[in-house]
Image (tube, helix red, strand yellow):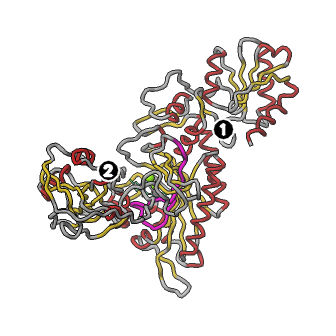
Amino acid sequence: MKQSKMFIPTLREVPNDADSKSHQLLLKAGMIKQVASGVYSYLPIAKRVLNKIEAIVREEMEAIDGVEILMPALQPSELWSESGRWQSYGAELMRMTDRHGREFALGPTHEEIITSLVRDELKSYKKLPVTLFQIQNKFRDEKRPRFGLLRGREFIMKDAYSFHATEESLDETYQDMYDAYSRIFSRVNLNFRPVIADSGAIGGSHTHEFMALAEIGEDTICYTDESDYAANIEKAEVKYVPNVAHTEEKALEKVHTPGVKTAQQLADLLGKRLDEIVKSMIVKVDDQFIMFLIRGHHELNDVKVKSYFGTETVEMATDEEIQAILGATPGSLGPVGVEKIEIYADNSVQDLNNLSVGANETDYHYVNANLGRDFNVKAFDDFRFILEGEMAADGSGPIKFAEGIEVGQVFKLGTKYSESMNATFLNDQGRAEPMIMGCYGIGVSRTLSAVIEQHHDDKGIIWPTSITPFEIHIITANAKQDTQRELADQLYDAYKRDFEVLYDDRNERAGVKFNDADLIGVPVRIVVGKQAADEIVEVKNRRTGESFEVPVSELEEKIKAIYASFE
Ligand SMILES: O=C(C[C@@H]1CCCCN1)Cn1cnc2cc(Cl)c(F)cc2c1=O
Ligand SMILES: [Mg+2]
Ligand SMILES: [Mg+2]
């Protein structure tokens, strides 16, 4: 492709609203243009890379008997009412009304559509299992779109859905998908980890997220070097090992603590360690207020609370709600004398006695509060985030943290949608049963960004050869110089048959062309410059930065040698 005919609006300056490295480079390399917040056009270089990522996804889906379809973005609200999600989703679900006043969702995902499609067709166990997938734009009205394509409001997803007569059959497809995802993310050259994850609103039991390691990642991964254990921190289980350090029970004592709002301030005032303080948090679970007791140096894990109570509607109580229930502000809450609401506690609260807690009176706390005598706990469980260095749930070794970008997720859905939408099949005894489902997503446009996050230097993107927009970048140092231009034209004509060639034939200064080439990041660059008359060109390896002066007669061999070095 001749660059004079292409559309690659590179930028010299970093756009100030670009808030991640990949976002900056996508803009500087002229790969995307923002249309609205979280909404982008993909320009030619990006489109070529997306085509290659999608081709790899298709290959790996079809290799495990996935069959491609394409569903509409416009989803009638009636189907979302059948599943109950029209009511349960809020502002994130983009909705519209057509000219007849009928309501639609702009599809954020396609469980309702696919289940309604399949329930009319797959009526017998003999026709199961089936795995269908699509690659299509999704719409989610994110409150804070950011990091370019990493968190957009319209994005490209591969979403697959599988339908089964038995759990075993689902387990098989789940494993096939898990392995196919590992192949896909390896092939696009991502450094990734599959992690145990929380299934959240979608329901279902078992799910893994595929995390691309990157500092910008919004997810925290917990992993150990001693095993392949890895979990999203939302889910990372804290194996409770009692470390009881009880002392002789002392009399409850009320202490005036003016201005104390935080556990640290209380610890400082009492001359105690932060971990000797117990924080009391009021959480609204469904529409019931619950008090959670957490050690001072721990944090409440809202995802574990949701999972424990089996609901997504979990919010911290507001100051007003707290005032109404306990008559105090959040800085002075405690379990002593609390009868109106249930009290749950994290396991590690059991390790201490003579606790320092709020007195439910602003500016007053208790010391020496003791379980049983002064307050009761309905249940102890794992309600906190694990700390770096604590033992992993599999006992293999200390947990380490890393940031990750969630580029894929596989779910065992079960019968949540087939029951609510009556998608049944006749089993081998002729009895109707709800189909067992799995669903599997890959963020295709997010994967593009994740690859850039992991493959760039200070000059620009360095494409892995598997998804590079072009294989060779031919540049004339001075397009006005006939000898250079003629040799470059000749090389372009010779190579464009066997290679994907980008030919910078523009009448731009050499420096501009080299800067653009560094930004666009094609793995191998050929510069036709002053030595064109001697049929010598410069070959540059974008990844290593090495340059070689090569006679044209040895050029193809050199290019292939550089490509071989990438394997
Ligand atoms: O999408 C999934 C599960 C899987 C992911 C892989 C492909 C198939 N779906 C979870 N999820 C996430 N955000 C959503 C946002 C909105 Cl606004 C919504 F209405 C529904 C969902 C929603 O269901
Ligand atoms: Mg997540
Ligand atoms: Mg997820």
Residue bearing mark 2: 91
Magenta segment: does it hold 210?
yes
Q: Is residue 549 above or below residue 18?
A: above
* Distance between mark 1 and mark 2 Cα atoms: 37 Å
Q: Position of residue 164 (x, y in %)?
A: 54, 73
Residue lying farthest front?
248
Return the disc, 1 or 2, that comes first in the chain's sequence.
2
Mark 2 close to ligand 1, CB under 8 Å: no
Q: Nearer the viewer, residue 206 or 527?
A: 206
Name which residue lies at 25% across and 68% down.
377
The amino acid type found where label 1 is placed reads Thr
Position of residue 545 in the picture relative to residue 394 (left or right)? right
Q: Nearer the viewer, residue 502 or 269?
A: 269
Pointer 1: what residue? 468
The residue lying at 50 percent from left, 66 percent from top is 412
Residue 49 as seen in the image, left or right of residue 211? right
Quadrant for the N terminus, please.
top right
Which image quadrant is residue 229 in?
Answer: bottom right
- 357 and 161: which is toward the camera: 357
In this picture, which residue range is highlighted in magenta? 195-214
Examine the structure image and report whether residue 86 is included in the region drawn in magenta. Answer: no
Instruction: Return the x and y of residue 302 as percentages of the image width and height.
Output: 34, 57
The secondary structure type at the circle numbered 2 is loop
Q: State the SS at label 1.
A: loop
Residue 503 higher or lower than 356, as above or below: above
- Pinpoint residue 417: horizontal percent, then vertical percent: 43, 68
Q: Is residue 164 above or below residue 408?
A: below
**Is residue 98 in view?**
no
**Residue 558 figure quarter:** top right
Label 2 is placed on what type of residue? Ala
Residue at figure coordinates x 73%, y 39% from the top left: 566
